[in-house]
Image (spheres, rainbow, N blue to C red):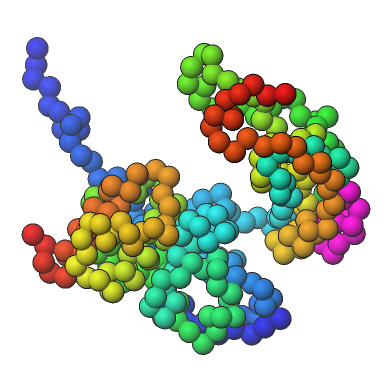
Amino acid sequence: MAKTESRVIGTPVLRKEDPELLTGQAKYTDDLTAHGMLWMHIVRSPYAHAKIGGVDLSRALSMPGVVAAFSGQDLAEDWTGPLLMAWPVTEDINNPPHWPLAKDKARFQGDGVAVVVAETRAQAADAAEMVEVEYEPLPVAVDMEAALESGP
Amino acid sequence: MARVEVTVNGAKREADVEPRTLLVYFLRETLGLTGTNVGCDTSSCGACTVLLDGESVKSCTVLAVQADGREVRTIEGLASDGELHPLQESFHRNHGLQCGYCTPGMIMAAVSYLKENPTPTEEEVRESLEGNLCRCTGYQNIVKSILDAAGQLSGTKA
């Protein structure tokens, strides 16, 4: 067998993408802008576990620059399924459904409950503060042992 | 609106901003300098670290109006005449980055730290990075990069 030259395998190679990344010239999704682009702000649950009652978007919708606002319940009909788990490591892995926004229950502090879309970042953030969500706090599991117990 | 005048990477920049505008959004959106990234918006991750009058600050925790009349340096202003800064070189050489999102913040924090302590120990470098999070590298090569650059900069390279 001919001698294989291992010029690459086993040899560290300097990355070609580094210069852009090291000088701030790389473009990430957050760096993209487009004409007429709108901003979305997510209203998040302050509770780690809570039942979501009504979500009142009316005050948010009347704020300047606001184009649209939706609760998880509003959008649920349009969703065809939960978000996919990118890497199910084992076949028996526990894979509870993850929805883009909470519909009936917030399951962690910061779970998205509603979104507000406006013409500027500040307008979206201001209007999101006007969204009124009725929460009914539920018991929480704050350590691993409690989390392993079967749920209600 | 509030008028701010900030020297950014050596050039005077003026703009009218809402008083609540954060320095990071002034840099990214008003000036178009998107090299400074927003990772968390809560002062936790350090991706938005820039130099304010030579000292590292998290630009998501500084108002643009607080930078009025002062000097800001961002990752875009670090290389000079097409020559990478020794820290940029050493991050490249030591594989101190993968996705690169935290890198501008890491490098700016390191620029400031090495000025304060030009010959740090590994432990001191690790401590100096407690305000900067990276989800790719496990920090090993970031620490290596900074120690390597410290050697280059202080001329004590073993």
Counting from the top left corner in percent of width and height, residue B106 is at: 37, 59
Location of the N terminus of chain B by quadrant is: bottom right
Counting from the top left corner in percent of width and height, residue B112 is at: 34, 71
Residue A97 shows in the view: yes
B71 vs A50, nearest the viewer: A50
Location of the C terminus of chain B by quadrant is: bottom left
B57 is higher (above) or lower (below) than A39? below
Q: Residue furthest bottom?
A: B69
Q: Is B75 within the magenta? A: no
B150 is higher (above) or lower (below) than B115? above
Image-quadrant location for residue B23: bottom right
Residue A25 shows in the view: no
Q: Which residues are magenta?
A: A56-68
Counting from the top left corner in percent of width and height, residue B7 is at: 47, 82
B29 vs A111, nearest the viewer: A111
A129 vs A70, nearest the viewer: A129
Residue at the image point whose x is 12% and y is 69% from the top: B155
